[in-house]
Image (spheres, rainbow, N blue to C red):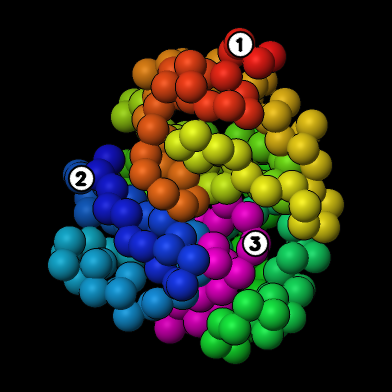
Amino acid sequence: MKYRIIPVTPFQQNCTLLWCEQTMKAAVVDPGGDLARIKAAVAEESVELEKILLTHAHIDHAGGTAALARELELTIEGPGRDDEFWIEGLPKQSEMFGFPDVEVFTPDRWLEDGDRVSFGEVTLEVIHCPGHTPGHVVFYHRPSALALVGDVLFQGSIGRTDFPRGDHATLIRSIREKLFPLGDEIDFIPGHGPMSTFGMERQTNPFVADRFG
């Protein structure tokens, strides 16, 4: 599997294009906006986009979903059903944060812990990691030792929990019990900012480092 990070929206959200090297079939994770930029990356990599994968439904991650799915006839998988209220609130989110008008959508498939999603010959494991939002999921590609963690964990920080139905203790538990056990060597793409590894965050992250546990 190969990937390309495409920062989108004024929030510089890490939309990620993933593709299967054997079939050149692709999926886009969290198309929050700037669809022309996303489509340009798809064209530059000469891949065929099959589906949209969503970690959660905040506007900077999900704002471009409905328009992109309609234009390119893509299926939408994720997030968890507990984020449905965030999807229904996308128009209000766009108004609050000054985004272009966005459309509400219904995913073709709600995701749960232990599910699998696939494109081409690539299969990703789905890990439910609530706390930032209740339906937040992480996508994990075991052969590449790569996780796409949305806004659960960042280099040196963690996701906000002051939004509706956010919960700090739940978020910490998600990171320590769901993500860190995958292994120190796992690289992760966060929703914002630079990549890191779970091992580095276990050593240095002031919110979840082992010494603060």
Please provide percent x and percent y for residue 132: 70, 47
Residue at label 2?
Answer: 21
Residue 115 visible at all: no
User: Looking at this rendering, what residue extends furthest in the top direction?
Assistant: 211
Sequence-first disc among 1 and 3: 3
Q: Residue 62: which quarter of the image?
A: bottom right
For the point 56% across and 82% down, which residue is it? Answer: 99
Could you tell me how far apart the alpha carbons at marks 1 and 3 are, in whole angstroms? 32 Å
What quarter of the picture does the C terminus occupy? top right
Could you tell me how far apart the alpha carbons at marks 2 and 3 are, in whole angstroms? 28 Å
Residue at label 1?
Answer: 211
Span shown in magenta: 51-73
Residue at label 3?
Answer: 57
Count of numbered marks? 3
Tell whether 162 sits left or right of 107.
Answer: right
User: Looking at this rendering, what residue extends furthest in the front direction?
Assistant: 206
Q: Residue 146: which quarter of the image?
A: top left
**In the image, what residue type sits under mark 1?**
Arg
